[in-house]
Image (cartoon, coloured by chain):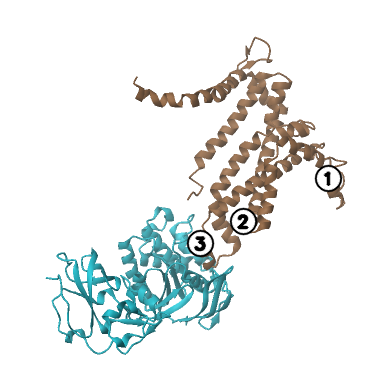
């Protein structure tokens, strides 16, 4: 069992509190992603789990063992670093072997393990090369092999894909998911990239300024954010959040207790005329910019409530700048003055879009 | 020849001129003189072929000078590097005290060698010296540091090590700081003990620094002159006479210019061998990032 529990963890660097009273449980065998903007304390949290930083106060448990004061090497954890941290003077073989020698694994057994691992990650022909002779992707694999060969209980990855190009990143993402399924051990993965978090994690921990914002599975996180921060962090482009007072002209009275109103760019429809139908917010808008991404198009529009991003999956609109943005009431999110979510009875309620008479969409022939 | 073609040569001419006048010409002239017998003033430089070389090789005093030089250089470099490396490992931390110690041990490097020699002559004085007073506290009395052939070379080595440590430590600290921190973190997660971390990670990563300091140190200590000239004058009984001092003695005190030039040629050869060795090994045995 390698469930990981953080209890009342506080980390201060001098007077700076980087992690503020963190309590969380990482389930055994899960692929947990800790995500958040730079400086949110995610790497520090990870390094405390690994034992590379000591918490200022609080306890860390791995399984039923309190490891707060255990040396990193004794925690049965393997880590993949952002810059791989390979031993530059050693060959790939020696890099993989190093931890095993420390563990006093006999030579014959080491040979077998190295052969197995290098086969899995596809490094067999590079075993006698030094790290600087390898490409970024290959170095990444060495780092993985070095971590895997120790058969750890917990696998920790600190932004491991950030130095790879987009294509390789996609490939490694799939390989890591497969690896997790194959090994069946706990993975803790730190990233600032919400796409990585959404695509890889089965549990996402969202941090901001050292405070946990939400812990959920990816789809729950996407559909049901707890607060403005989560809503804006998950999804690209970010959720459009507008002050409720700016939206007053478009909204019926019953939403008046909310301080902020939001909707996802992909939930808005672009229609060419005023659409007199209940249950929709209709905003007369002007298209400012158009980003055509192929499968989808992202518009920046302006209306009386401010600037908004709209994501559309139809052909780009080229013939007009003036359009109407329509958002179903049940796709609106409401937040109070403290930016916490108000789970309004009106949101996510009854009227499915299919039952509403659809107007002609602009573009999309 | 057009200006475009001539321009590079015109541009490098001043440098070549200086190099020729002050490096190539003196070396050439020294080699020329090594085949001659000359007393510095006589208009005649008598050609003697290789006889300067043969008599130098048969000269027991010169052989001792060579032995002294190798002994002095080897021990000085070995001790300076070992002590500096240990100090660097200790001082490679943040904190006011570490900075102060580092500054303190660096200060001898900026003091002139003449002052250092005078200072140490006083420290190492048999009867009134600080060193013997200090050792006296432990019951060790009256070691004739500079006046006994058994200890005189060692005394000079101590001075050289004392002067060199600060500079070497500084270079080592720079070398240590260029080692990425995450390698050590990876090693910690690999459950590596401190000794193995030092020998398997730190030392290999420091190898360029180590190699650079060894060669620079050897070349430097082969040319030792000031401390010898001031503190011992090569004595007692030739026990601290090294090659540069020997050249000076023969050339400017005995006016055997041909003979001194021959010793100079031999020094040139030794340093040349080190330099070739340095560049040959560079990038092979040594790890560069």
Task: Give me the chain that's brown.
Answer: B
Q: Vertically, is A93 above or below B37?
A: below
The chain letter under disc 1 is B
Label 1: element kind: helix
- Of mark 2 and mark 3, the one earlier in the sequence is 2
Residue B182 badge:
3
Q: Do the CB atoms of the residues marked 2 and 3 lie less than 8 Å apart?
A: no
Question: Split into 4 quadrants, where in the image is the C terminus of chain A?
Answer: bottom left
Label 2: element kind: loop
Q: Residue at the location (70% across, 40% down)? A: B111
Q: Position of residue A53 (x, y in %)?
A: 55, 69
**Residue A32 appears in the rendering:** yes
Q: Vertically, is A1 above or below B236?
A: below
The chain letter under disc 2 is B
Q: Residues within 10 Å of mark 3 (few under 14, many from 20)?
A: some
Q: Vertically, is A316 above or below A216?
A: above
User: On the picture, is A302 further left or further right than B151?
Assistant: left
- Residue holding disc 1: B130
Q: Position of residue A92 (x, y in %)?
A: 43, 59
Q: Vertically, is A113 above or below A3?
A: above
The chain letter under disc 3 is B
Residue furthest to the top: B43
């Amino acid at each position: 069992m390698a469930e990981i529990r953080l209890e009342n963890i506080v980390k201060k660097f001098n007077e700076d509190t980087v992690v503020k009273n963190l309590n969380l449980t990482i389930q055994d065998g899960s692929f947990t992603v800790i995500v958040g903007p730079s400086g949110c304390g995610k790497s520090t949290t990870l390094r405390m789990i690994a034992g590379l930083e000591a918490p200022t106060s609080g306890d860390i448990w791995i399984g039923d063992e309190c490891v707060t004061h255990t040396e990193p090497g004794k925690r049965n954890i393997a880590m993949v670093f952002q810059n791989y941290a390979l031993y530059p003077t050693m060959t790939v073989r020696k890099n993989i072997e190093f931890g095993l020698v420390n563990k006093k694994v006999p030579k014959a057994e080491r040979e077998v393990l190295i052969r197995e691992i290098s086969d899995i990650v596809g490094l067999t022909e590079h075993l006698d090369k030094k790290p600087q002779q390898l490409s970024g992707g290959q170095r990444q694999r060495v780092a993985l092999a070095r971590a895997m060969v120790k058969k750890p209980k917990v696998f920790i990855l600190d932004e491991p894909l950030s130095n790879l190009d987009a294509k390789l990143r996609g490939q490694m993402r799939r390989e890591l998911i497969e690896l997790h399924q194959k090994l069946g051990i706990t993975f803790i993965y730190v990233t600032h990239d919400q796409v990585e978090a959404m695509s890889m994690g089965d549990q996402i921990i969202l941090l901001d300024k050292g405070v946990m914002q939400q812990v959920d599975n990816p789809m729950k996180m996407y559909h049901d954010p707890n607060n403005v921060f989560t809503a804006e962090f998950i999804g690209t482009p970010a959720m459009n959040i507008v002050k409720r007072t700016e939206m007053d002209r478009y909204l019926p009275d019953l939403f008046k207790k909310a301080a902020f109103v939001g909707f996802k760019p992909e939930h808005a429809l672009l229609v060419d005329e005023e659409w007199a139908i209940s249950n929709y917010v209709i905003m007369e808008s002007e298209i400012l910019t158009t980003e055509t991404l192929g499968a989808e198009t992202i518009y920046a529009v302006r209306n009386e409530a401010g600037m908004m991003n709209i994501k559309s999956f139809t052909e780009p609109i080229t013939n007009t700048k003036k359009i109407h943005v329509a958002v179903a009431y049940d796709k609106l999110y409401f937040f109070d003055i403290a930016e916490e979510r108000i789970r309004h009875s009106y949101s996510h309620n009854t009227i499915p879009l299919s039952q509403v008479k659809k107007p002609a969409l602009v573009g999309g022939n | 020849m057009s200006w475009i073609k001539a321009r590079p040569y015109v541009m490098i001419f001043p440098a070549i001129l200086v190099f020729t006048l002050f490096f190539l010409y003196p070396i050439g002239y020294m080699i020329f003189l090594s085949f001659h017998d000359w007393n510095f003033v006589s208009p005649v430089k008598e050609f003697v072929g290789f006889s300067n070389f043969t008599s130098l090789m048969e000269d027991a005093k010169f052989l001792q000078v060579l032995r002294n030089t190798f002994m002095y250089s080897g021990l000085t470099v070995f001790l300076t590097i070992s002590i500096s490396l240990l100090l660097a490992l200790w001082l490679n931390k943040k904190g006011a005290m570490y900075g102060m110690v580092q500054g303190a041990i660096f200060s001898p490097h900026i003091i002139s060698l003449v002052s250092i020699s005078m200072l140490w002559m006083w420290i190492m004085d048999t009867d009134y010296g600080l060193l013997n007073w200090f050792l006296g506290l432990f019951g060790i009395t009256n070691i004739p540091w500079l006046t006994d052939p058994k200890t005189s070379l060692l005394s000079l080595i101590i001075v050289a090590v004392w002067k060199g440590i600060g500079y070497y430590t500084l270079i080592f600290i720079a070398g240590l700081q260029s080692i990425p921190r995450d390698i050590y973190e990876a090693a910690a997660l690999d459950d590596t003990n401190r000794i193995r971390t030092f020998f398997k990670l730190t030392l290999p990563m420091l190898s360029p620094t180590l190699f650079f300091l060894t060669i620079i140190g050897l070349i430097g200590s082969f040319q030792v002159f000031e401390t010898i000239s001031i503190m011992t004058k090569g004595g007692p009984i030739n026990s601290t006479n090294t090659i540069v001092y020997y050249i000076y003695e023969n050339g400017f005190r005995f006016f055997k210019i041909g003979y001194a030039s021959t010793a100079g040629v031999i020094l040139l050869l030794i340093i040349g061998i080190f330099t070739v060795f340095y560049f040959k090994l560079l990038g092979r045995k040594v790890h560069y990032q």
